[in-house]
Image (cartoon, rainbow, N blue to C red):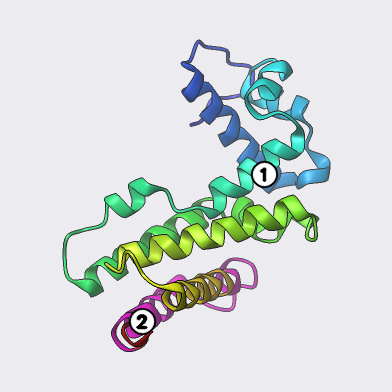
Amino acid sequence: MSVEAGQRRRLEPDARREQILSVAVRLFGERGYADVSTTDVARAAGVARGLVNHYFGTKKDLYLDVIRVMLTVPEVAIAGLPDGDLPTRIDAIVSWFLDVVSRHSRSWLAAITAGGMGGDADIDRVIAEAIDAAADSVLTAVGLTGSGPAQHAMARSYVGLAVSTAREWLQRGVLTRAQVHRLLAATLLTMVEQVFTDA
């Protein structure tokens, strides 16, 4: 996903779109929404600005895709979970989450705070959809597919805890990664064994 600025090479459309999105994730994370233009993204991706517009539409549409990609658990992450017992699967999904947010910490933090664009209806909708999708992923990861509304609401609450706890680690430096991992893994295991089953 990394192509240095100025390099131009022929890519398939999906690969080119992914490359542009990767560059946008980095730039919006580094500088924020107001300070990044589609020209900046195009230049850093080594493509014409018209190609950015072709794949993503407006700058805001591109930013909405950046938020989506930073806040959504891809299916491949769930599919790649080990076949072990529940604690093993929970440990793996928490590790995956912490790896992603630490590797893309600036972009992830910008996405969860909407890059200073909180209150924008489109951004609020995308964040809410991402939280719903993350809740579904949590339930799938722990083997609770087809859950009811109460379990889904509880899973959304867990996603909120995960986001807040990761911020304590990445933004405020109060918690260590090991502390965050223990808190999130133990909480999810307790929720599955003692809370979700009663919902």
Q: Circle 2 sits on which residue?
A: 196
Residue mark closest to the camera, 1 vs 2: 2
Give the secondary structure at mark 1.
helix
Q: Height in image: 116 above or below 32?
A: below
Left or right: 157, with 76 as reference point:
right
Q: Which amino acid does label 1 sit on?
A: Leu
Count residues near mark 1 (Cα–Cα under 10 Å), then give few for <14, some for 14-19, many for 20+: many
Q: Which amino acid does label 2 sit on?
A: Phe
Residue 177 quadrant: bottom left
Q: Which of 195 and 53 is in front in this view?
A: 195
Residue drawn at the location 27% of the way across and 51% of the way down = 80
Q: Which mark is residue 64?
A: 1
**Residue 132 coordinates in the image, percent (x, y):** 52, 62
Q: Nearer the viewer, residue 35 or 143?
A: 143
Count residues near mark 2 (Cα–Cα under 10 Å), then give few for <14, some for 14-19, many for 20+: many
Q: Height in image: 161 above or below 118?
A: below
Give how far apart the Cα atoms at labels 1 and 2 are: 32 Å
As for residue 156 lying within the magenta part, the answer is no
As for residue 176 lying within the magenta part, the answer is yes
Give the secondary structure at mark 2.
helix
Residue stretch rendered in magenta on the structure? 167-194
Left or right: 109, with 36 as reference point:
left
User: What is the quadrant of the C terminus in the image?
Assistant: bottom left
**First reached walking from the N terminus: tag 1 or tag 2:** 1
